[in-house]
Each structure stands twice: as C-alpha cells, then as structure tokens.
Image (cartoon, rainbow, N blue to C red):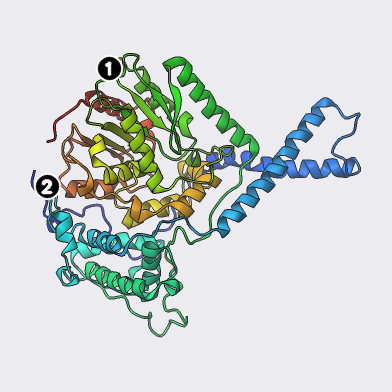
Amino acid sequence: MGAVDASKVSLEGVDLYAEATPQTPHRPLSYYFALAAILPVKAIIWVSWLFVAVQLWRNGFRLVRHSSPALEKIWVIWALLEVLFSLHQWHLVDTLSRKPARIEQASMPRLRMLFKRIVNVGLHDPPVLDPDFAQDLEELSLDDIPKLDFDDPRALDFRNALRTWFSGASWASLTRYPMLSWLSWSMFNASVEDVSDEQRMLLDRALVMMERRTGATFPEKLGDNAKSAAPGAKVKPLRLTLDPVSVQSRPLLAYAVINIMGWSTRWWFQWEFGVRYEVAGRMEYLIRAPPGGSSEPPILFLHGLGIGLAQYSVLVSAILKSPELAHRTILVPLQPHISQQIFHPRHVRPPRHRFVVQDLKTIIERHAPGPKKEAVVLSHSNGTVLHSWLIKAHPELVQASCFVDPVVFCLWEGDVCYNFVYREPSNGIELLMRYFVGSELGIANYIQRNFDWSSNTLFFEEIPNALDPRRTMFFIGGKDAVLSGDRVRKYLKLHGVTEDNLIFTPTAAHGEALLPVGPIMPRIMEWIKATRPLSPS
C-alpha cells in the first residue's frame, strides 16, 4: 500500500482557526448523578473525624466507655481507623508532592530524533514502508525542515493541536517564554531557568523547529500590555511532572472494597480456570497454561488504569473460557501501582521502564513455545504504554499487536495529559473517572511524577507489520474522554491504515470495549482467536 500525501489529507472536523477554548457546556444531569454518588464516599472521612471528636467530647477524652453498646464500639473502631488512614494518606501525598519526578533523562541524540519525528508528522508522505526512515531523520538538518506559511493547512492543524498544552489559550497570546517553558519540561523535565548550556542549545533549536512547523514566530512579548518580567508568563503551559500533584483522598472503606474485589477476582480465576500466580523479576503475573502445553504464541494482556483485575474480569474471563483459546497460554501481568492496591508495597513505587521491559521479556521467553519466542499482545489504555516499550525494545518478541483505546499515539498533542489531569469534568463519566481513577494516590503519583510522555510515545513506523490486519489491530472510540479518537484515527489513516485493521466506533467511550454488550468486545475476541504463527508479511 502506498503512502498518503499529507498536504492533501482532509482536515474536516478540525477547527483550525479556533482562537480560544469554548466555554464548558451546560452540565448534563449525569454530572449531578455522579456527584451524588461521589459525595457520600468523600464524606466518610469527614464524618469519621467528626464522630471521633464528638466521642472524645462526650466521654471525657475517651473514645468509648466500658458500658458503651457493642455497636457503638464497632463504629468507633471504624471511625478511628478512617481517621488514622486519612492522616497516613495525607502524609503520603505531602511526601510525594515534595519528591522530584522519577523520569530517566533521555540522551541528546534521542531528543533530537524525537522532535524531528514530531515536526515531520503530517509534513511529507508518511514513511509507511520505508526501512531507511530512521536514518533519513538522523541526517535531516534544520534547513531541511520547511518553513510553512502561516495559512498552510498543515501549520494551522499543528498550531491548533499545540494549544492544548496551554489549556487552549489563543494562539495570539503565546509568546517565546511559555513555549520555551513547555519545551524545557517536555525535553528535560526542568524549568527553563534550570537547564544547562548544552540543553539550552537544543532547546533553542527545538524552538526554531516549532516556528518552522507552525508557520509562526513566537514574539518576546505581547506588546505594550506585557508588564511581566517573564514575557507571556500569564499563559502557563501544562508541565505534568512539575506541576503540583492533584490527589483527592478517599476512605479506607473504598480501598478495602476495591482490594477485596481484586483478590476475589484473582481467587475466582484460580478456582474456575486453573490460573496460577507467578513472579518474573519485579513483575507479578497470572498465567493459565494448557495441561499439555501449547505450540502457539501465548496471549499477553496488558491492562490499564483503574481498579486492576476486577475491572477487566469480563474480558479476561471471555478469553479464559473461550473453547477456541483453550489450547493457548494466557498471561496477565499485574500492576498494583495503577490498580489502587494501597496495601501493596509497590502502590506508590512504579517500576522503571527498563525493568518492565526486562520482566516482560522474561515472561514471554519463559512461556512461549519453540525457538522463536514471541507473543500476541493485547493492550488497553495505559497498557498500550507497556506495549509500546516492548515493541521498541524487542519487536522480535511481538508476533501480533492489538491496541484498544491506545494512549501512546499523538502524545505530543497533549490531549491525554489535558483530559486526564487538567480538564474540568463536564459530565458524569468524566467526573467519575476523575475522582475514582485520575485523582487516586497511586495513579496520580504514576501519571504526575512518573509518566514520561516522550518515552511513552509510539510512532506508527515503529510498529512491526502495522498494515497487516492479521498482525496489527486498532480499536478507537469517537467519544473517548481521555484521548482524541478523531486525531488518532487521522494519524493512523495518514500512514495508510484502512478499515481492515482500524475499528473506529464513533459513539464509543473510553473503556467501552470492556463491556460485554456492544460490537467491540466480540471483534476483539474474533481477532485474538484468528491469531496464528505467521511468516512475516
């Protein structure tokens, strides 16, 4: 299949000339239903504090009297546990907020390559089948990056996407300082004032690249109205790992319920499907192996943010009980740091990138049959981050890939960062996702202190056999509240992906693929069942 001419790709549906973020729409009824569900959960902490205070006041600084009824003693014990747990949680939040981000600094050559890739997206015919693309980029000089006209559709599109990193500020309000501030964070995880001389040279070079790509020049100041010592400082970029950590406390009861659900799901899988628990390095995982072994590649499922195994019980159960997959080994790595497993020692200690890749490699090599060690990888949401790490480090281990609600594409455009952390929820789903997922301590720590967008970004040309529907599949929803489904679809289609291996559901929300009702899960299952050892295309 040939490449697509980027200059002729339709930009229908993209508001290229927008100069300000639209006002938040009127909140629907679902928002208030969600709020009604959240408030009682949040109230448990404050009611517990109030109850303990009243008990101390009533009983002369004693929580209970010997003559107190048994039920009252139970309530006191629970309330006291909630109070102590809230203090522990607040201490953790304060400690994590003070710690610097755990981001492994990329090398200068890698950063140069990264920004060359970004500014080249949509500029020329995509290198769909060009094996020399990486070498071509390495040899690309600054002069080879065309200076687009301000009204060029490619420049307009890039500018509009870039504004997301500034909370949708009008393009006219962006000056040199906030752009340098964003570039400094995105490249070095540092404030622009703290970079070294060598880093500053690369920073200035990246700024020139951005000016060429956007068809615009960033002024030093806005004009006579600029009164700040740092011109343009009022426009603040989103700097995910430098901005304060946003955490909303939740009661011990909520964690207890979630953990009980997770443990129960795991025990049920062990009892019903013969799943067993194993460890590879630092990674815990579940495995279901056929009694006589398997001659076909194992299926590796990488889950996303939320409540862990219980959240994916329907999908994993469907895979485990499928007669067509009874002869296949199923592997499910566990990720306690993004599963609200607060009682786990790694809840606020996410594993490093290199250790995750090393452990995934160990798991695949341990359970894949034959001399050619490879697996079919199915990933959802944040699981696509681990998927991308594995592909980039060891593409030979990935026999086929299925990306569901992938957050790894177009990360440079900022939609995932803005939607998940910064945007004000405007409906019930977004509000529930923000409180029960995005603002949980372990997840917030992972996203806001350990999420390296440059490392987590996956470019299309890095995917093996990306145009072969037997080897690569993408499932994207048009109503996704985390990523921009339309933008990701456009990016994939720009590189030649067709409906053969891109399933775009306009009405689907993030995570809808996990629901047994609807057309998405059956399509995922159909694709998994069809995977077989194949010779390279």
Quadrant placement of the N terminus:
top left
Q: Mark 1: which amino acid? A: Glu
Q: Position of residue 283 (x, y in %)?
A: 44, 36
What residue would you read off at disc 1?
Answer: 324
Amino acid type, label 2: Leu
Q: Nearer the viewer, residue 452 or 74?
A: 452
> Please, is residue 177 above or below residue 186 in the view?
below
* Figure check: 57 above or below 181: above
Residue 261, percent from left and from top: 54, 28
Q: Residue at x 18, y 46 (%)?
A: 493
Q: Spatial distance from mark 2 to mark 1, Cα to Cα?
A: 33 Å
Kindly check if marks 2 and 1 are in contact, taking CB atoms under 8 A apart as contact: no
User: Which residue does the image show at 31% across and 64% down from the upper left?
Assistant: 108
Asked whether, in this view, residue 84 is left or right of residue 104, the answer is right
* Residue 270 in view, yes or no: yes
User: Which residue is under mark 2?
Assistant: 129
Label 2 residue SS: loop
Residue depicted at x 32% and y 57%:
412
Q: How many other residues sit within 10 Å of disc 1, few (<14), some (14-19) or many (≥20)?
A: few
In the picture shown, does residue 196 fall above or below 418?
A: below
Q: Secondary structure at mark 1?
A: helix
Q: Residue furthest left?
A: 2
Percent x, y for residue 177?
39, 75
- Asked whether residue 381 appears in the rendered view, the answer is no
Displayed quadrant of residue 50: top right
Q: Is residue 58 left or right of residue 419?
A: right
